[in-house]
Amino acid sequence: MEIETHGLHVGIERHDNNFFLSLKAKGKLTHEDYQTMMPMIDSALQSVVNPEVDALIDATEFEGWEARAAWDDLKLGLKHGSKFRKIAIYGNKDWQQTIAKIGNWFTSGEVKFFKDIKQALNWLNKDR
C-alpha cells in the first residue's frame, strides 16, 4: 500500500507591518489543509494595521488541489490579496507558471514564477 502525502508547511515572519510568508505545498492539497493554514494567516494579518506581505511558495512537490481546496485558495486570494506586495512561486512544472499569471488577477501585488529559488528570493528582497 502506498501512502500519499500532502499538506502545507507554513512559516510567518514579521518585522513591524511587513510579513514574509513561506509556504511549501506537497502533493494534492485538500480542504483540510486550508482549514489548518487559514487561521494562522488570518491571525497574523489581523493583528497589524496595513500589513504588507511578501510570499515564497515552494511548489516543487505540489500536484494540484482537490476541488474544494481550489475554492479555498481562491477565497484566500480574495480575502487577503490586497495585502500582498510580491508572491514568488518556485516550481518545476509549466502549468505552475500559468497559475502565477492567474494569481495576478486576485492580488494587488505582483505574482511571478521562478524555476530557481535564488532568483525568487532575490526578486522578493529587491526594493525592500
Image: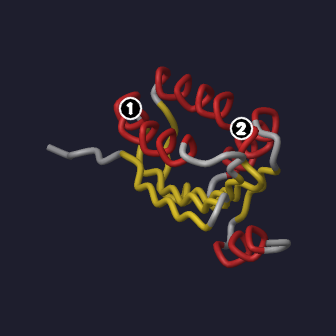
* 16 with respect to 41 (left or right): right
Front residue of this view, candidates 84 and 110: 84
Label 1 to label 2: alpha-carbon separation: 18 Å
User: Residue 5 appears at what percent x and percent y?
Assistant: 30, 48
Residue 77 position by quadrant: top right
User: Residue 1 appears at what percent x and percent y?
Assistant: 14, 43
Measured along the vertical axis of the image, is residue 104 above or below residue 90? above
* Residue in view at x 46 percent, y 60 percent: 11
Is disc 1 placed on a helix, strand or loop? helix
Residue 91 position by quadrant: bottom right
Front residue of this view, candidates 47 and 35: 47
The residue labelled by disc 2 is 81
Q: Amino acid at mark 2?
A: Gly
* Residue in view at x 75 percent, y 42 percent: 98
Residue density around tag 2, few if under 14, some if 14–19, many if 20 or more, within 10 Å: some
Measured along the vertical axis of the image, is residue 114 above or below residue 116? above
Q: Which mark is residue 35?
A: 1
Is disc 2 placed on a helix, strand or loop? helix
* Residue in view at x 47 percent, y 42 percent: 43
- Toward the left, the furthest residue is 1
* Residue in view at x 85 percent, y 72 percent: 127
Q: Amino acid at mark 1?
A: Gln
Residue 88 position by quadrant: bottom right
* 7 with respect to 62 (left or right): left
User: Residue 41 appears at what percent x and percent y?
Assistant: 50, 44
